[in-house]
Image (tube, rainbow, N blue to C red):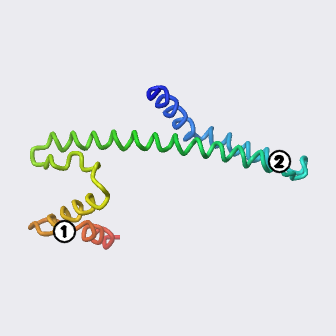
Amino acid sequence: MDRLFTAIATRISAASGQPLTFALALAIIVVWGVTGPVFGYSDTWQLIINTGTTIVTFLMVFLIQNSQNRDAAAMQAKLDEVIRALDAAREQFIGIEHLTAAQVEKVRSAIEKEVGDAKGKAGTADDSVERVLKRY
């Protein structure tokens, strides 16, 4: 079931991001809008577009979430491999994505402080961003 859903989700996600799909959706909206006077802007006419867009939106939420979950997991696995492969990297960082948001924030703050205290380092991310913004 997982493989089937992943295959379907991948294909629909790829297709939904194409210009042709956008053009098709736009054409549907234009046709719907043009037929308004023909149907007297009736409740049924309005219900058709409302129902259609609600169904598409509802299903796309799940597909987008599935794609984002897979992308994030793949990215995390790649980063974990880079950490594992680099001798200077601290392997304790592998798997920190399983911590709570508060715990991750503590780790992030500690790293920024550590970098800021090190000689010859840029300091915090704010310092680095500030220097970049001053260039422009």
Q: Is 44 in front, or is 134?
A: 44
Q: Is residue 105 above or below residue 98?
A: below
The quadrant of the rendering that contains the C terminus is bottom left
Q: Assign a secondary structure to mark 2.
A: helix
Q: Assign a secondary structure to mark 1.
A: loop
10 Å crowding of disc 1: few (<14), some (14-19), many (20+) = some
Q: Is 98 in front, or is 46?
A: 98
Q: Amino acid at mark 1?
A: Gly
Q: Is 71 in front, or is 51?
A: 51
Please give the name of the residue rendered at 15% of the width and 64% of the height, measured from the top-left corner: 115
10 Å crowding of disc 2: few (<14), some (14-19), many (20+) = some
Please give the name of the residue rendered at 23% of the width and 42% of the height, measured from the top-left corner: 80
Please give the name of the residue rendered at 9% of the width and 44% of the height, measured from the top-left corner: 87
Q: Is residue 47 above or below residue 129?
A: above
Circle 2 residue:
45
Q: Is residue 30 left or right of residue 78?
A: right
Closer mark to the observer between disc 1 and disc 2:
2
The percent position of residue 128, horizontal first and vertical second, equals 25, 67
Please give the name of the residue rendered at 33% of the width and 70% of the height, measured from the top-left corner: 133
The percent position of residue 30, horizontal first and vertical second, equals 76, 47
Circle 1 residue:
123
Q: Is 33 in front, or is 108?
A: 108
Q: Is residue 30 left or right of residue 89?
A: right
The tally of labels here is: 2
Q: Is residue 63 left or right of residue 91?
A: right
Q: Which tag, 1 or 2, sits closer to the chain's start?
A: 2
